[in-house]
Image (cartoon, helix red, strand yellow):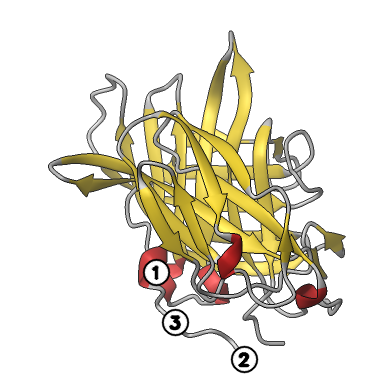
Amino acid sequence: MKLKMLMFGLLMMTALTSLAGGTCQIIQIRVACPNDNTACGIEVCIDGIGCAKTDSSGIARICVPKFGTYTVCVNEATLPPGAKLAPRCQNVKVENEAPPVIDFVLSGEFCGGETPEGECWLTGGGTIFKTKGVANYSFGGVVYPGCSPEAAGGGNWNVVDHFAGLHFQGKQIIVDSCSGVETRSPRVNVNIIDFHGTGTLVGVAGNPQAKIDVSFVGRAVDNLESGGGSDLLFLSVSAGNTVVMQIGTSADDPAVISTGNLQIHTTGCGN
């Protein structure tokens, strides 16, 4: 049965969120089995920052007040019965306006062996290309959280072009299709998601570009776990008839992500 939850914590309406008169950046953490089984109420913590609990999609969100490297740990006492986890902690580097995503993989009897089927949804985060040690693009977000088109307007997808000084944010997203082949990253029966929608584009890092409304089309291909050097992303953002940001040549020729992961899920999706 398709999840119809709004999942308030998963809104991610902006990559940067107001916090005590300043800003914070949302780190998105997902705790799930290789076959995508997961549970709500698993506690994840960042030392000195705070803790949060996973929702029914296995996702928790914690805001950090500044760029830097943080250690994210899972409280093993809150794991569901029969679930195991290793490693318990991971480091994440927060360095740009595209919110990072961290995946913790569960094992044990809790996971079982059933392969979910049906429609799909997407989580992801990472970088694409690098010039003189600086990533050309950073990306992160979620599409159809929990497989629900109603949650957060279909999701929130962020891309920062560091060389052009542009921040794209997809705010209203529609999934067009889920296709491809079965994979084990996690184990699902599709590995390609095509989506489109509307959003905004604004200048950052000294670029005076005012915020404008844009439309976009995208494709993500989940090939391996983790995805750096293997997963693929295409995104074309347009203002009217003008393309203002593009990653990859076309949907059939997407770019290989350099770091991070693109992960397709089918939990919560109807057949």
Q: Say what amino acid the circle numbered 2 marks.
A: Met
Tell me if 182 is positioned left or right of 197 in this view: right
Residue 56: % across, % down: 53, 76
Task: Identify the secondary structure beneath mark 1.
Answer: helix
The first of marks 2 and 1 along the sequence is 2
The answer, for residue 214, to whether it is visible in the render is no
Tell me if 256 is positioned left or right of 43 in this view: right
Q: Check the picture and name the quadrant holding the N terminus.
A: bottom right
Q: Say what amino acid the circle numbered 1 marks.
A: Gly
Give neighbour class at mark 1: few <14, some 14-19, many 20+ (Cα, 10 Å). many
Residue 114: % across, % down: 84, 80
**Residue at image point 53% right, 62% down:** 143
Q: Say what amino acid the circle numbered 3 marks.
A: Met
**Residue at image point 38% right, 36% down:** 167
Give neighbour class at mark 2: few <14, some 14-19, many 20+ (Cα, 10 Å). few
Disc number placed over residue 1 in the picture, else none: 2
Read off the residue under disc 1: 153
Read off the residue under disc 3: 5
Instruction: Give the quarter of the image for residue 267.
Output: bottom right
Does residue 166 sit above or below 146 in this rendering?
above
Disc number placed over residue 131 in the picture, else none: none
The answer, for residue 9, to whether it is visible in the render is yes
Task: Identify the secondary structure beneath mark 3.
Answer: loop
> CA–CA distance between discs 2 and 1?
19 Å
**Residue at image point 70% right, 74% down:** 37
